[in-house]
Amino acid sequence: MNRSLRRTSAALLAAVVVAPVLLTQAASGEESAPAGSSGIGDAYWPLDGNGGIDVASYRIKNRYDLASQRLEGRTVLELTATSELGSFNLDFLLPTTKVTVDGRRARHSRPDKHELRITPASPLAVGSTHRVVVHYAGNPDDKRYAGERNWLANDREVVAMNQPHMAPWWFPGNDHPIDKATFDISTTVDRGREVVANGTLVSKTRTKRTITWRWRAEDPMATYLAFFAAGDFEIERGTTGGLPWVNAVSRLQDDRTRAGSMRALRTSASVVKGLEKDLGPYPFEVTGGISTGLPVGFALENQTRPTYPTLGGPAESLIVHELAHQWFGDDVAIARWSDIWLNEGAATFMEWRWVERKGSRSAADILRGSYDNIAADDPFWDLTIGDPGKDRIFDNAVYERGAMTLQALRQRIGEDAFWLLLRTWLQQEAGGNATTQDFEALAASVSGQDLTPFFTAWLRTPGKPARTADNGLA
């Protein structure tokens, strides 16, 4: 996510459910299979995600009516039980009408508005794979969770985009970045409307009154990165340097603004090629972007196709930021929300690097300017960006100080070691999830230096880091 406009593994999934499972058994005193926990235990949002399951794929088939803003459909989940389960949960806000597990009706209930509890006809054995189908219907705009009302729509357009939560408003899932899955998204709308989603367009199926757009993303992604937009869009497709792209701009924008937004989006593929010079191969099969006509105050790094507000003016730094997230945040996702600086700091740093590569200003000069111009008693320095708290994960300091941390690290360990670190990080963690501790350990290994004092000063200590060589500021 861009702040200036804004607003893993199965083993780990199994590990987080052990304690809740044991507690359930002890409390019930029953021999029946235990229930999966209602969350994976993320410190910021404990109910996000669910214990005992690892989702491999989602196949979403929805019908959306723009006039009434009603959504109905079904989602097919292919999942593995990571522990023995008598029941399990999914994160979902819409009313549910029917659930089946492996073709058999399953009971479903609502422990609270965010949790959908599913009890299959027979317990699920550890390691077994299952096909879960959830049917539902409702108005997403009526739903709120964690103080968020996330549905962005009017009677002419909708875009399902938000962070950290979006999925529960339009499909049932295991809603935490730790559980990535592939997505196949079909959305039916009235004829004459367009739908854009992640990945590549597979098909368009027409009836007398409707059209169904089916999009598929080949690479696993976190649930909050899945999106769809429907309405009246101008869509362009092409290939640059062997990389396919799809761009879409809302016709709610006036002609002049829409032309400017499309010009900005057309730079996406070339920006990707530029980022590859530092970061290595682009991790996905397609790129592009979408510019909505809704009054959205932020952009988001939806996998393969970032979503943007109106882009009528200069937008290069914003596009660089969101496309840098395809590496930092999408391909290599965080394992917990407290590590958000890994995403936002890196994407902001790559904005600095982009300016540097153009010869406009060095990243070292940007760091020096920020450090010198922000007084020690400024609240900017109060936040510990390595664990900012759930209410401040998108604070400006997370972005700017995250970028400052990386540039200071670059100055501390040297140019060769720094870029080797970033490329190794992206290769080693590709397709998975990682933590700040993982990054610190790799930085120490690549550089051969004890960097504990450095990261303590920049990530875990409130206050302005001292201007020392150890802090990368000499």
Image (spheres, rainbow, N blue to C red):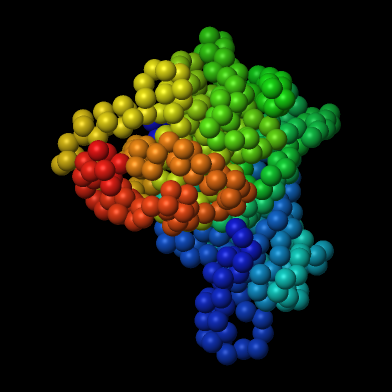
Closer-to-camera residue (171/14): 14
Residue 265: x and y, percent? 58, 21
Residue at the top extreme of this rendering:
256
Q: How many marks?
A: 0
The C terminus lies in quadrant: top left
Closer-to-camera residue (219/118): 219
Residue 230: x and y, percent? 64, 31
Q: Residue at x 38, y 52 (%)?
A: 449
Q: Residue at x 65, y 74 (%)?
A: 83
Closer-to-camera residue (124/83): 83
Q: Which image quadrant for residue 130?
A: bottom right
Looking at the image, residue 299 lies above or below residue 428: above
Closer-to-camera residue (29/357): 357
Looking at the image, residue 173 lies above or below residue 343: below
Q: Residue at x 36, y 21 (%)?
A: 361
Looking at the image, residue 59 lies above or below residue 88: above
Residue 382: x and y, percent? 23, 47
